[in-house]
């Protein structure tokens, strides 16, 4: 039992070890094939300065001022930055951006160079680059962040040293901070506002009324909402109470809601006989989704025995912005045949390779005008390599090399192709025996009947061969038939079709034999008549017996036959009698 348990444990250990090896191999495999984005930190930041609301550089700011942090940045052409690479850095902790930020860096054509995200709580800025950095050179830009003093770290009337990350190092700017403002004992109207840190489209507003606690008869406060905002009337709250010198408020009795009246441009509050302080708070919603760097609002306090007071305030300038520019080049390739006419060729395909041997684009095709154009090329030396020839043409993979730089940004190149050519064989045969016939002569014509080649003869195997033919329609026309055959001038039509490969075509032509000529006999010879015919001699019998000549109409043959019949009949009768 113990041995079994030992074996089990050993197997478990082996299994776990094997699993660990698999996991390790998997991690190594993924590491080799997944390239992490590169963070360049502050390497591309070139300079930094602090600007006031008018864009002027300063090193003295009030305790409540809005301060613009202005950076410039540039990417060296020698650095190969890729889409997804980042630039991350942290702003000085003494300066706080007003809200969390997210915005795009764009060029003058609206192309996005990168995306910026800045976090209020940490001051961290992350810029993520788009493929713009892969298509442009001489890339540079700027970054702006609106900020305020972090009052938990900075006091009034002091010098503050701010450390900014720049170009992988630290640049220090020393700033004189103004004094903290105390609430004036005679104050009767004050107002301020700010954008919500989590949602900059929401603007918080606070109104401080009658801090001096003077006697105001028939007091009325009216609020006027500025542009790009709408008030949330239900958010309005008003309380009587007590402010301390540091603006801390102790609330008392609420102002009745019936005394808060909505108006066309905001609201007003009827406060009646006012002898204490009142705090009013509410919020507005921006109609531009928080895009404005600042929002404005107005207020007015009136009374029967009181000199009216007005106030106009802006929220602290918030937000961020930036931009970037780059330079790129383009190339136009014209694809033609190698004829004198340089006819444009459609359908050729190319790939673009950079100096590092990396394929940037592929499947780039020439149009009906034989042209292709590639833009957004950063400075580099490139090769256009043909990967597919136009239909009917020979593929030529010799690269077309060109260089984009600051002096050559729009280039024009060309590339010729030689057409593919076909061949044809004609076989001459007897129409009946299919015997191959030598000695037939042809001429080659185009489809319009124009003679292209002559004196094309079939060899002893009855064949003739023609090559170096461009795609098109042709015809063979017989000009001389083989010996003993009838000439047939009916064209033998054929078409050379080539789809990116050399092909051979075979056609046939039959001939009919001439008919054989019959043998006619010679005319018969007619005998000539004698020139002097002789009179026949008189026949004289050597016997004294006279010969009786047959009479006119007698026939010696008939007489002989009759005698023969009589003899046969007599002989037959004698034989018959003997037998009896």
Image (cartoon, helix red, strand yellow):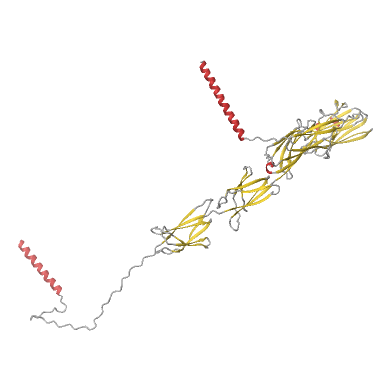
| Residue 153 spot, x, y in % from top left | 81, 28
| Residue 1 spot, x, y in % from top left | 51, 15
Residue 146 sits in which quadrant? top right
Eyeballing the image, is 451 above or below 95? below
Q: Write the residue at 68% across / 35% down.
A: 38
Query: Seen in the image, is 285 located left or right of residue 22?
Result: right
Query: Seen in the image, is 41 located left or right of residue 268?
Result: left
Towards the viewer: 181 or 375: 375
| Residue 76 spot, x, y in % from top left | 71, 41
Query: Seen in the image, is 562 located left or right of residue 255?
Result: left
Query: Seen in the image, is 326 located left or right of residue 455?
Result: right
Towards the viewer: 99 or 406: 406
Q: Is residue 504 visible?
A: yes
Quick one: which residue is furthest to the right in this view? Answer: 305
Q: Write the residue at 57% across / 50% down.
A: 396
Q: Is residue 284 visible?
A: no
| Residue 495 spot, x, y in % from top left | 51, 56
Towards the viewer: 453 or 570: 453
Q: Write the residue at 90% across / 27% down.
A: 276
Residue 172 sits in which quadrant? top right
The quarter of the image holding the C terminus is bottom left
């Amino acid at each position: 039992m113990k041995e079994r348990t030992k074996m089990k444990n050993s197997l478990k250990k082996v299994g776990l070890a094997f699993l660990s090896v698999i996991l390790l191999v998997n991690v190594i495999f993924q590491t080799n094939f997944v390239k992490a984005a590169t963070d360049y930190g502050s390497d591309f930041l070139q300079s930094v300065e602090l600007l006031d609301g008018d864009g002027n550089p300063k090193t003295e700011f009030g305790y409540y001022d809005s301060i613009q942090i202005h950076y410039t940045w540039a990417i060296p052409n020698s650095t190969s930055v890729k889409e997804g690479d980042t630039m991350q850095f942290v702003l000085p902790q003494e300066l706080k951006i007003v809200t969390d930020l997210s915005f795009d860096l764009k060029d003058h054509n609206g192309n996005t160079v990168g995306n910026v995200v800045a976090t209020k709580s940490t001051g961290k800025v992350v810029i993520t680059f788009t493929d713009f950095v892969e298509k442009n050179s001489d890339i540079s830009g700027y970054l702006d962040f609106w900020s305020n003093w972090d009052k938990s770290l900075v006091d009034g009337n002091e010098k503050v040293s701010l450390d900014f990350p720049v170009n992988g190092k630290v640049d220090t700017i020393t700033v004189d901070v103004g004094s903290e403002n105390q609430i004036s004992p005679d104050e009767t109207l004050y107002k301020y506002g700010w954008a919500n840190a989590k949602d900059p489209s929401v603007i918080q507003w606070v109104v401080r009324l009658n801090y001096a606690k003077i006697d105001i008869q028939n007091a009325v406060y009216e609020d006027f909402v500025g542009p790009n905002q709408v008030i949330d009337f239900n958010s309005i709250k008003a309380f009587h109470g007590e402010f301390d010198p540091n603006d801390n408020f102790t609330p008392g009795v609420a102002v009745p809601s019936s005394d808060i009246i909505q108006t066309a441009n905001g609201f007003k509050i009827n406060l009646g006989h006012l002898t204490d302080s009142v705090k009013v708070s509410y919020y507005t919603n921006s109609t531009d989704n928080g895009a404005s760097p600042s929002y404005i609002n107005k207020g007015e306090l009136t009374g029967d025995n009181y000199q009216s007071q007005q106030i106009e305030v802006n929220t602290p300038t918030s937000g961020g912005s930036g931009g970037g520019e780059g330079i790129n080049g383009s190339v136009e390739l014209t694809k033609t045949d190698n004829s004198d006419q340089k006819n444009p060729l459609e359908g050729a395909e190319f790939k673009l390779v950079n100096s590092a041997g990396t394929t940037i684009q592929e499947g780039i095709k020439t149009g009906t005008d034989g042209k292709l154009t590639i833009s957004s090329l950063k400075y580099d030396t490139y090769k256009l390599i043909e990967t597919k020839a136009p239909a009917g043409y020979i593929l030529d993979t010799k690269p077309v090399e060109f260089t984009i730089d600051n002096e050559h940004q729009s280039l024009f190149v060309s590339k010729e192709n030689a057409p593919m050519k076909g061949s044809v064989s004609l076989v001459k045969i007897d129409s009946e025996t299919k015997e191959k016939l030598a000695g037939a002569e042809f001429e080659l014509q185009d489809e319009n009947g124009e003679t292209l080649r002559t004196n094309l003869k079939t060899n002893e195997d009855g064949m003739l061969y023609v090559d170096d033919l461009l795609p098109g329609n042709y015809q063979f026309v017989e000009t001389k038939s083989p010996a003993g055959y009838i000439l047939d001038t009916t064209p033998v039509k054929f078409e050379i079709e080539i789809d990116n490969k050399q092909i051979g075509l075979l056609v046939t032509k039959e001939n009919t034999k001439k008919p054989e000529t019959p043998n006619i006999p010679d005319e018969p010879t007619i005998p000539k008549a004698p020139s002097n015919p002789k009179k026949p001699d008189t026949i004289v019998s050597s016997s004294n017996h006279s010969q009786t000549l047959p009479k006119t109409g007698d026939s010696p043959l008939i007489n002989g036959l009759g005698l023969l019949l009589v003899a046969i009949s007599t002989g037959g009768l004698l034989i018959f009698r003997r037998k009896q």
